[in-house]
Image (cartoon, rainbow, N blue to C red):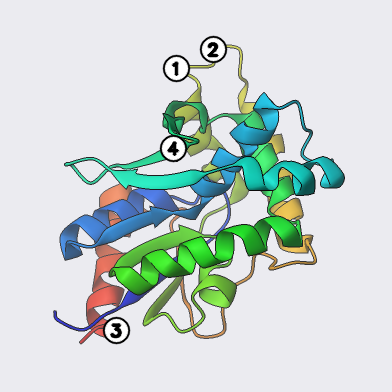
Amino acid sequence: MNKHYAIAIDGPAGAGKSTVAKAVAKTLGCYYVDTGAIYRTLGVHFAMLGIGPKDKDGITRLLGDAYIEVKYTQEGEQRMYLNGEDVTGELRTPEMSDYASKISALPVVREYLLDMQRQIAKEHNVVMDGRDIGTVVLPDAEVKIFLTASAEERARRRFLELSPKHPKLTMEQVLSDIRQRDEQDSTRKIAPLKQAHDAVLVDTSELGVDEAVAEIQRIVQEKLK
């Protein structure tokens, strides 16, 4: 496949976007871009500075101090660097999830990261996942997919992912966080979470990982013929 292409995968928290996108990117031999990790990296930046996710003035003032890099291991794993330090291990927590959701609603933050995301897609073939990839970041993407699942199923998956490192975490807390995140993402004024008019809807509530990946690969192959 010689032509340049971008595959946009959008959907709510816990829908399996990262797992599916990684697998599809590996199959195609292209870059996988987890935009949520980019926003979470900014969350780490502000948390380290003691700036809350609702402090618009502080965020605007200190945004330019965050130098964010996306790097890849030989195995194709995306690693996030903040001012030269690998912070990938600090991103997958409920706190950073909340930070990411709240700061992503700020126009100044979205504008700051938009060019970065588009430049990656301009330079490479990509599978990019997030909340507004098909609607805002890459509106001309050759393939658009909206990946979803029930809130309960997404919370179950997230709980299994987080509980080994956070033994005090409860399923009820994760479900509450998922629902709150859905509300924040879908009702924000700037680039809300929604299905692009030309995106293919895929519900993974009843699908295992391999089945979900196979379905996405089928759609991609059909669209990129």
Q: Are marks 1 and 4 in contact (CB under 8 Å)?
A: no
Residue 177 position in % (x across, y down): 69, 37
Which mark, residue 164? 1
* Residue indicated by mark 4: 81
* Contact (Cβ within 8 Å) of mark 4 with mark 2: no
Quarter of the image where one finds residue 169: top right
Residue at 33% x, 45% y is: 71
Disc 3 vs disc 4: Cβ atoms closer than 8 Å? no
What is the quadrant of the N terminus in the image?
Answer: bottom left
> How many angstroms separate mark 1 from mark 4 (CA)?
24 Å
Say which element carries label 3. helix
**Could you tell me which quadrant the C terminus lies in?**
bottom left
Mark 3 = which residue? 223
User: Is 212 located above or below residue 4 in the figure?
Assistant: above
Distance from disc 4 to disc 2, alpha carbons, whole Å, reads 27 Å
Residue that carries the numbered disc 2 in the rendered image: 167
| Residue in view at x 20 percent, y 55 percent | 26
